[in-house]
Image (cartoon, rainbow, N blue to C red):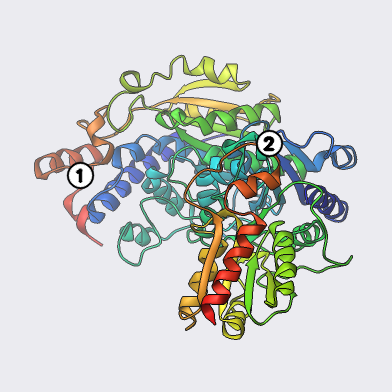
Amino acid sequence: MRNAYIKAVYDMAGIDRNVLALVADNGAIVFDDFRRDYPEQFINFGISEANMVSAAAGLASCGKIPFAYTIAGFITMRSYEQVRNDVCLQRQNVKLVGVGAGMRYSSLGPTHHATEDIAIMRVLPGMNIIVPASPREAYAATRYAAEIDGPVYIRLEATKEPEFYPEGYEFQLGKGIVLREGSDITFIAAGSIVHDVLKVAGMLAEKGIGARVINMPSIKPIDKENIVQAARETGIIVTVEEHSIIGGLGSAVGEVLLEHGCGHTVFRSLGVEDHFCKGYGTHAYMKANNGLAMERIMAIAIALSILDR
Amino acid sequence: MNHDIEYMKNLARQMRRDIFRMAYKAGGGHIAPAFSIVEILTAVYMSGVLRHDPQRPDDPRRDRFILSKGHASAALYAVLAQAGYLERDQLDSFCQEGSILGGHPNMLEIPGVEASTGALGHGLGFATGIALAGKLDREDYQVYVVIGDGECQEGSIWEAALFASSQNLSNLTVILDYNKLQAMDTLDNIIRMEPFAEKWKGFGWEVREVDGHDIAALLEALEPNESQAPRIIIAHTIKGKGVSFMEGVPIWHFRLPDDEELKIVLRDLEMDMQELVGS
């Protein structure tokens, strides 16, 4: 996703000199092409994320389209008041890009994880939130973000995420994508964990349970229609995200269900419980160690399906 | 540039009366922090230093002024009225129901306001972005920012200061309202900022020091910046300047006078009760 993002900004920079790549001293090597070909459009703010966001707002007030990129926890948390006051309150056209979201920087520990970022961005007035699940989605979403006049938070993970979209995939804000049909239960997920959910859905099929899988890259605005339809047709909704169960995708989906007469839906939000992520190891280990093992997702889905019968 | 200093002094006197009337009618306001910057705003807005056109507040080539210490909004509104962005009558709506003029300025609603400040430590970083955009676009507009001395206790000021000098933002001028007081006490008794000038020099800035109530001295310091570096004008000011009992007294950071004190205010500001309460 990271390389797809950088490629998208690179492609746009060649077309529009107002597109700027801002970094807070991260991205050695991967930004080399950009730095070489568009040196004036690349600005390294050093290790000062808050100032990067304030300055991005100032640049946007002059017609620039700044993409401010750094580790997800830093861009959203270290700079939070700058995001709120300088970007959102002043409705500035700033794109915030967080890399290494969730537990992707597994062994670096909780200081380098971001499992609360969606919650705190979601509450900011006017903020759009995009959580791509694959490199092509990251590319398309980045291109799309430049077309929106207003703040966007793009939540990236890292590299080598698998792909499930064809070349030329077009992202649409506010739209969920049904990746797999099913009528017994619906998974709604965002980020690379969508791939895990697709595997779980395949295993459930072997047990005779038809699981619908909706990829929901647009967390805000969210695809209410898709959610309501899935609730009515399958009766069970399980959200899956590499984020706290408080305030993220699960909360957003839950709000839609309650506000649209779907309060009877069997609903479960899976993510990181009310704790910082535990352990060190691979990304897969970290997910498993923090409540997001595929086996657990599957067991919960089976239990809910049995209960619903 | 030829300046009519006496004329500008008169404008400054009128601004203090406007500021006090706004706060008095609103039943509260940051009077002393606003009085501190009256001559600074007069020098920037009313002398031709700031190249702007109230008829075209969105002109991309305009000079920008940002009041980073947004709690002194009454002073900004008063000068915006003098400069032609606001109607004089509008000032009386300060902090009243239905008004666009709040206790901190709102750039989306008030013509001529460049930044919605209030939380301290934001205006300078925002201004560095505007200055950088000017450099990238090879525009020659200037960016002026007034920051508070207490505000410099925010780390974000120093992040922005480092960035501005690293980027050679010579189109950026900061005017530091150095009144030596913050909300609860003197800076010296809370967080010492001295040696202030050396700090800014050490951060790579061109530094000037002036009497912040001397309009002629301010104008001289505001002559075009010949240096490659961003510059700061350290303006030595008196918080509450213009009202004898407020000058240099911390409690007047946010406070209205009682009936006895009011008489002194009216005398000091050379205004009568009619001007204060009339509409």
Q: Which residue is disc 1 drawn over?
A: B256
Please tell me in which quadrant of the rendered image residue B274 appears: bottom left
Mark 1 residue type: Leu
- The image shows residue B10, relative to residue A137, as above or below, that is above
Circle 2 — which element?
Answer: loop
On residue A24, the disc is: 2
- Chain at tag 1: B
Q: Residue at x 30, y 61 (%)?
A: B96
Q: Is residue B127 left or right of residue B189?
A: right
- The image shows residue A126, relative to residue B11, as above or below, that is below
Across and down, in percent, residue A194 comes to 71, 62
Across and down, in percent, residue A174 comes to 65, 71
Mark 2 residue type: Ala
Circle 1 — which element?
Answer: loop
Q: Same chain for labels 1 and 2? Say yes or no.
A: no
Q: CA distance from mark 1 to mark 2?
A: 45 Å
Foreground pick, B7 / B274:
B274
